[in-house]
């Protein structure tokens, strides 16, 4: 892709929610060598509130997938706020997607595709798709999805 990440974000018409403040003793991001690590992010809405719900209980797979996409927007906002330009990111390396779901839900990979598809749109298919895990678990504040990720820098 020839256009910059910032230009692609504008072309896609993406709107970032406010970057969340840390909810504990940790750094939102950490740069080590040529890698940017991002702490787990939840789905922050544009008004600053958290999306809540449990996949398979009060949220279906498609709604949870949209929440995962919102986590991606939240993560991009966090990177931009605490690191600066998203144009410094070369590629997505690793994603850990966690879905707050019932024990019989079983569609965690589908849900996390909401995050992964956004990253592919923003960084391109080659650089926006890295290795990934998608698991079900209980999450804080009843958020439906949390994602942490690692990116390679230029």
Image: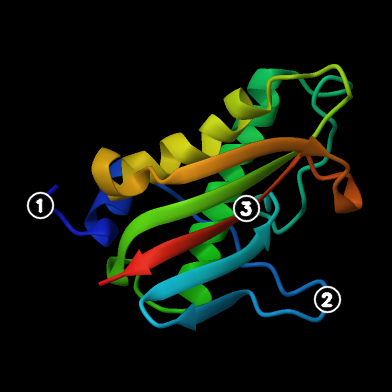
- Tell me the SS state at disc 3: loop
Q: CA distance from mark 1 to mark 2?
A: 39 Å
User: Residue 5, percent across and down?
Assistant: 27, 58
How far separated are the C-alphas under marks 2 and 3?
22 Å
Q: Name the element at disc 2.
A: loop
Which mark is drawn over residue 91? none
* Dots 1, 2 in contact, CB < 8 A: no
The vertical placement of 146 against 111, above or below, is below
Report x, y in % for residue 128: 35, 46
Residue 48 figure quarter: bottom right
Residue, x 29% and y 49% (percent of image)? 127
Task: Tell me the residue that label 2 is attached to.
Answer: 24
Which sits in the foreground, 43 or 1? 1
Question: For residue 78, what is the image quadrant?
Answer: bottom right
Q: Upstream in the sequence, badge 1 or badge 2?
A: 1
Label 3 CA crowd tier, 10 Å (few <14, some 14–19, many 20+) = some
- Is residue 13 something one can see in this rendering? no
Residue 10 percent location from the top left of the image: 30, 52
Mark 2 surroundings within 10 Å by alpha-carbon count, few (fewer than 14), some (14 through 19), many (20 or more): few
Residue 113 lies left or right of residue 86; in this view the side is right
Mark 2 or mark 3: whose residue is earlier in sequence: 2
Q: Residues within 10 Å of mark 1 (few under 14, many from 20)?
A: few
User: As displayed, is residue 25 above or below residue 112?
Assistant: below
Q: Secondary structure at mark 1?
A: loop
Residue 9 is left or right of residue 16, and the answer is: left
Name the residue tied to disc 3: 46
Image quarter for residue 103? top right
Q: Which residue is mark 1?
A: 2
Q: Are marks 3 and 1 in contact (CB under 8 Å)?
A: no
Marked residue nearer the N-terminal end (3 or 1): 1
The image shows residue 45 at horizontal and vertical percentages of 67, 50
Q: Residue at x 49, y 62 (%)?
A: 150
């Amino acid at each position: 892709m020839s256009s910059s990440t910032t230009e692609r974000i504008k072309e896609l018409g993406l709107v970032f929610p406010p970057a969340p403040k840390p909810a504990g003793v940790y750094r939102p991001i950490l740069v080590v060598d040529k890698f940017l690590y991002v702490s787990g992010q939840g789905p922050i809405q544009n008004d600053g509130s958290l999306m809540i719900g449990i996949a398979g209980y009060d949220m279906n797979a498609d709604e949870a997938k949209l929440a995962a996409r919102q986590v991606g927007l939240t993560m991009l906002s966090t990177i931009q706020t605490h690191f600066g330009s998203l144009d410094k990111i070369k590629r997505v390396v690793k994603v850990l997607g966690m879905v707050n779901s019932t024990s019989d839900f079983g569609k965690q990979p589908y849900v996390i595709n909401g995050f992964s598809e956004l990253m592919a749109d923003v960084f391109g298919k080659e650089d926006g798709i890295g290795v990934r895990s998608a698991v079900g678990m209980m999450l804080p504040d009843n958020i439906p999805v949390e994602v942490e990720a690692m990116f390679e820098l230029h």
